[in-house]
Each structure stands twice: as C-alpha cells, then as structure tokens.
Amino acid sequence: MAKTWSIKNLYFYLVCLATLFIVVGGFITTVNSAAEILLPNKPNVPLIYVYYRGDPAVPEQKTPSLSELEKMRAEQERMDHYYNSWAMRRLLNAIALMIIPIPFYLYHWKQVKPKLGRDK
C-alpha cells in the first residue's frame, strides 16, 4: 500500500497545487473587482463645485465662471469613465485568471489519477 513518489508524480501534484492557488487568487480578485464596480471607492467630489461667500475669516475666492465649471465637470466625467473601465478590465482579468488554469489542472490531475489506481 506504499505510494511511489516519483519526480513525475511530484511534478503533477505541484502543478495541480499551483493551478488551484491561481484559481483561488482569481476568485478573490473577482469578488474584489465586482465589489469595486458595485460599490465604487471614489472620492466624494461633487460634479459642480459650490463656493460659499460670507465668511470674513476666509479670504474671498473668485467664483469660477460657467465655462470653468463645465471644464471641471467634463474632467470629473472623464475620470469616472476611466475608473469604471479600469474596474471592468480588472474584473475581466480576474475571471480569466479563474478560467485559464482549469484545463491545466484537469489534465494534470487525470495524469495523477491512473498512477494512483495502478499503485493500489
């Protein structure tokens, strides 16, 4: 009933272990990325900035013109679009990280199984 531990068997087991680690890492990254898309962690910056006047202790600031506010809003929308596309790319990478190692795992595990059956 003693198992024979050859270099080949050890290689197959190590590949299976490594692919399982990659799949688990991909799963964790997928959950993080999905949470990032659903619950974004962006700074709470309004699209249109409001400037209040009236506090004498604070030096009076020049109120931005409408065109400046529109530029700020356009920049904020560009940043939001960049953030959303980055989060989506990260999610797709994580899903690929889960899917790609599965055939490697299945192949190597099938190579180990017959050897274990013959050893019994």
Image (cartoon, grey):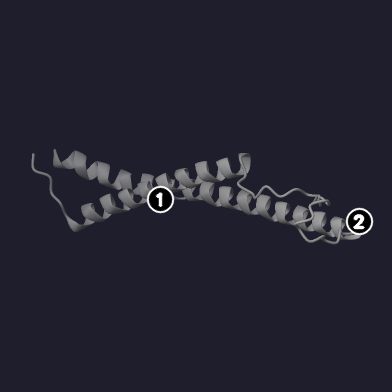
Question: How far across and how far down the image is residue 113, in percent?
Answer: 26, 41
Binning the other alpha carbons within 10 Å of mark 1 as few (below 14), some (14 to 19) or many (20 upward) gives some
Q: Amino acid at mark 1?
A: Ile
Return the residue at label 2: 66
Given residues 100 and 83, the one toward you in this image is 83
Question: How far across and how far down the image is residue 111, in percent?
Answer: 29, 47
Return the residue at label 1: 22
Give the Cα distance between marks 1 and 2: 51 Å
Picture quadrant where residue 73 is located: bottom right
- 77 sits left or right of 108 in the view: right
Residue at x-position 79% and y-position 55%: 56
- 34 sits left or right of 78 in the view: left
Residue at x-position 86% and y-position 56%: 70
Binning the other alpha carbons within 10 Å of mark 2 as few (below 14), some (14 to 19) or many (20 upward) gives few
Sequence-first disc among 1 and 2: 1
Residue found at the very far right of the displayed protein? 66
